[in-house]
Image (tube, helix red, strand yellow):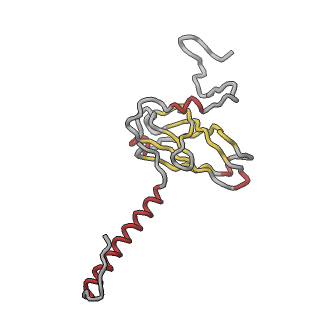
Amino acid sequence: ILKTYDRANSHRDSQSSMRITHRILTLILLFCTFSEAIGQWLAGYQYRKEITIDHDEWEGGPHANFPMLFQTITDADLVARAQSDGFDIVFTDTDGETLLNHEMVSYDGAGNYRSWVQVTLPDATLSTDKIIYMYYGRSSVITLDPSTTDTWDSGYQAVWHMEDNPNGDPVLGILDAT
């Protein structure tokens, strides 16, 4: 509400008006600053973590749709806020909204999480770190995100995760892939 005062109003009214205007402007500035600090947020998720991939950790580039191994060890936030099966954990690009393909390898409910996340990395000589986000804490997710099937594109002939049981399948007796 904008109020206009003429010169006939007392000094007290003028001071009161300035204080009210000052408070309104302060609230508007606080709201704008707060909104900018949060940035874009993936709808339906309660929590996120910023992940910085240091430009010194890769060579060459740019690398498009590169599967990167992401791992947490006893992450207390995931224990407290993610689903016990980890199916609510998703990743986004720098903008905070563009979903990244990922394949969850394992999550034990104790904060130990492993996933292959498909990222696009800039040329390492640009000295630019890559920021992505991990979102979690969405109770309505009951199955894995469909992006998990697209993590490995058709350029891969096969994908083997070597941490699989080295003793083979106890029922079928399979010890290797030959």
Which residue shows up at 35% across the image and 75% down it? 22
Q: Nearer the viewer, residue 161 or 154?
A: 154
* Position of residue 65 measured from the top left corner of the image (x, y, whole percent): 65, 39
Position of the C terminus, as image quadrant, is top right
* Position of residue 123 measured from the top left corner of the image (x, y, whole percent): 71, 49
> With 126 as the anchor, is 108 left or right in this view?
left
Which residue shows up at 70% across the image and 29% down it? 155
Which residue shows up at 59% across the image and 31% down it? 150
Q: Residue furthest top?
A: 172
* Position of residue 52 measured from the top left corner of the image (x, y, whole percent): 58, 50
> With 72 as the anchor, is 6 left or right in this view?
left
Position of the N terminus, as image quadrant, is bottom left
- Classify 127 as above or below 25: above
- Classify 10 as above or below 21: below
Which residue shows up at 46% across the image and 45% down it? 42
> With 8 as the anchor, is 66 left or right in this view?
right
Label tally: 0
* Position of residue 154 measured from the top left corner of the image (x, y, whole percent): 67, 28
Res 143 → quadrant: top left
Q: Nearer the viewer, residue 76 or 133?
A: 133
- Classify 2 as above or below 85: below
Q: Nearer the viewer, residue 64 or 14?
A: 14
